Image: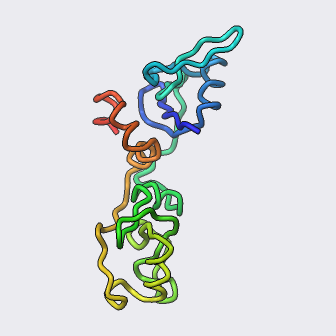
């Protein structure tokens, strides 16, 4: 299912929602479509809407400031674009660089996306002990980076320049 970026009334990125939720928000006049998928429309007996890529809430929603995105397994996979940090193939699991048994925690800087084979091969060792090299280092994404990454690389290229630069 398509993801739709939700902007606050002040054009700040808030979250991503499913296409169905985005349409409900637009139909209830709680949001307006800022950017639509080119050439795609949703049609029904009494409805003809462009498929929303970005919607903006009609009323401002106050949200507490977050300096960094909360850690999650899904977030790590999205941050690393579902690519294994050891071989570059499709990643399905999350690997701890410093294993939990050795004091490593569930943090952005200690976890990377990994394919099941490399995760099993590395086992309960550090990459150096296992003779494996990280193709890219883990980093802490901003909340806006996390939302845009969840939309996907091809969709990000379709976003307006003003939105990509502000996020």
Q: Residue at x 56, y 21 (%)?
A: 31
Asked if residue 87 is positioned above or below residue 122 in the image, the reply reads: above
Q: Quadrant of residue 81?
A: bottom left
Q: Quadrant of the N terminus?
A: top right
Q: Quadrant of residue 114?
A: bottom left
Residue 7 drawn at (x, y percent): 47, 31
Q: Residue furthest right?
A: 45
Task: Out of 30 and 123, give the one closest to the viewer.
Answer: 123
Q: Residue furthest top?
A: 46
Q: Quadrant of the C terminus?
A: top left
* Residue 31 left/right relative to 98: right
Asked if residue 66 is positioned above or below residue 62 in the image, the reply reads: below
Residue 34 drawn at (x, y percent): 45, 21
Asked if residue 73 is positioned above or below residue 144 in the image, the reply reads: below
* Residue 50 left/right relative to 132: right
Task: Out of 46 and 68, give the one closest to the viewer.
Answer: 46
Residue 56 drawn at (x, y percent): 49, 25
Q: Residue at x 29, y 78 (%)?
A: 133
Q: How many marks?
A: 0
């Amino acid at each position: 299912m398509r993801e739709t970026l939700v902007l606050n009334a002040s054009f700040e990125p808030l979250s991503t929602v499913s296409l169905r939720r985005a349409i409900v928000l637009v139909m209830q006049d709680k949001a307006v479509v800022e950017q639509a998928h080119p050439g795609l429309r949703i049609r029904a007996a009494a409805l003809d809407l462009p498929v929303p890529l970005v919607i903006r809430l009609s009323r401002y929603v106050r949200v507490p400031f977050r300096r960094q995105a909360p850690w999650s397994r899904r977030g790590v996979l999205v941050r690393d674009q579902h690519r294994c940090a050891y071989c570059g193939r499709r990643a399905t699991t999350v690997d701890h660089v410093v294993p939990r048994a050795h004091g490593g925690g569930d943090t952005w800087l200690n976890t990377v996306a990994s394919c099941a084979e490399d995760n099993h091969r590395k086992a309960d060792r550090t990459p150096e002990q296992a003779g494996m090299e990280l193709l890219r280092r883990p980093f802490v994404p901003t909340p806006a980076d996390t939302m845009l990454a969840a939309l996907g690389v091809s969709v990000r290229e379709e976003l307006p320049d003003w939105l990509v630069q502000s996020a």
